Image (spheres, rainbow, N blue to C red):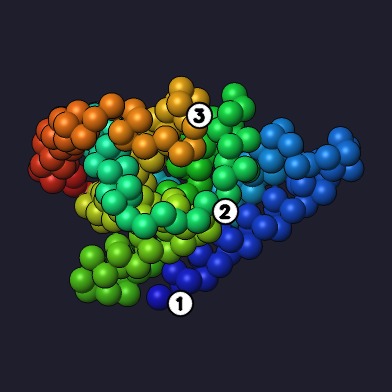
Amino acid sequence: MKRALFYTIMFVAIQFLAGGVAALIFKLLNGDSTGATGLIVTTATASIMAVVIFLAAKWTVVSRHWIQTRPWFVLFWCVMAALGILVPSTWLQEQMPTLPNFAEDAFDMIMKDRMGYFIIGLLAPLSEEMVFRGAVLKSLLQWKRNPWIGIAISALLFALIHMNPVQMPHAFLVGLLLGWMYYRTDSIVPGVVYHWVNNTVAYVMYNLYPDPDMTLVDLFGSQRTILMALVFSLCIFLPALYQLNLRLKK
C-alpha cells in the first residue's frame, strides 16, 4: 500500500513540478502560459516526464510478451467495451447530484484545440495506464490476496488524481474495468487501447457538441430514445465484457 501511495504522490508531484517548470519557460519565451498552446505544452511535458521517470526508475516495467501473443480479438473487444459503456456511464452520472467542475475552463481550451487530442487521446492513456495499472495496481496486487481490493483502491486513486469532482465517478468505474484487464493479462496494452477509445470519443463528442451543459435528453430528444440508446449500448458492452472474460489471459 505504501508503494502505491508513493507512486501516486510521485505522479502528482511530477505533474506540478514538470508542468510548472514548462509553464515558466513558456511564459518567459512567449509572455503568456495561460492560453491553449501554453496549457497543452505544459500538460504534455508533465505527461512525458511521468512516462520517462517511471520507466527509468523501473517503477513500471514494460514488456512485449503479451502483445507478442497477437491478441487482436481481445483488443477489438476492448474497443467495443469502451464504446458500449459511454451512454450508460453518462446516464448514471446524470442521476447523481451535480458535482463541481473545477477544471472546466482549462479542459475547454485543451479539448477545442487540435493539438489537444495529443494530450487527451494519446499521452493521457499511455501515462495514466503506465502509472495506475503498471505501477500502482501492480504493487497493490502483491499486497492483497483479494485482487478486487487492489483494483478498487487503484480505481479510487485514479479517480482522485483527476482532481475534478465531475470526472471522478466515470473515472472510478472505468478504473475498475481497466484494473480488471490488467489483473487478467499483466499488461497495460488492453487498458491503453480502452483508455484511448474512451478519450477519443470524448474529444470528438466535445467538438461536435461543445455545450458543457448538454444532457442525454438534449442529444437524443426524449426519455424513450435514451432508453433505446441504453439498451443498444448494453447490447454492445455486455457481449464485449463476456468475450473479454473468455479471452483475457496472462
Q: Mark 2 vs mark 1: give the one in front.
A: 2
The residue drawn where x is 52% and y is 51% is 101
SS at mark 1 in the image: helix
Mark 2 / mark 1, whichever is N-terminal: 1
State the CA–CA distance, disc 3 to disc 1. Answer: 41 Å
Residue 154 location, quadrant: bottom left
Mark 2 / mark 3, whichever is N-terminal: 2
Which one is in front, 124 or 220?
Answer: 220
The residue drawn where x is 36% and y is 37% is 215
**What is the x, y in percent for residue 41?**
70, 38
Which mark, by number, is residue 2? 1
Which mark, by number, is residue 210? 3
Q: Identify the amino acid type marked 2.
A: Phe
Which residue carries the number 2 mark?
Answer: 102
Residue 135 visible in the snapshot:
no
Instruction: Classify 126 as above or below 2.
Output: above
Q: Identify the amino acid type marked 3.
A: Pro
**Label 1 Cα crowd, 10 Å radius (few <14 / some 14-19 / many 20+):** few
**What is the x, y in percent for residue 104?**
57, 45
Which one is in front, 36 or 224?
Answer: 224
* 3 and 1 marks in contact (CB < 8 Å): no
Residue 3 visible in the snapshot:
yes
Instruction: Classify 125 as above or below 157.
Output: above
Residue 228 location, quadrant: top left
The residue drawn where x is 38% and y is 40% is 195
**Label 2 Cα crowd, 10 Å radius (few <14 / some 14-19 / many 20+):** few
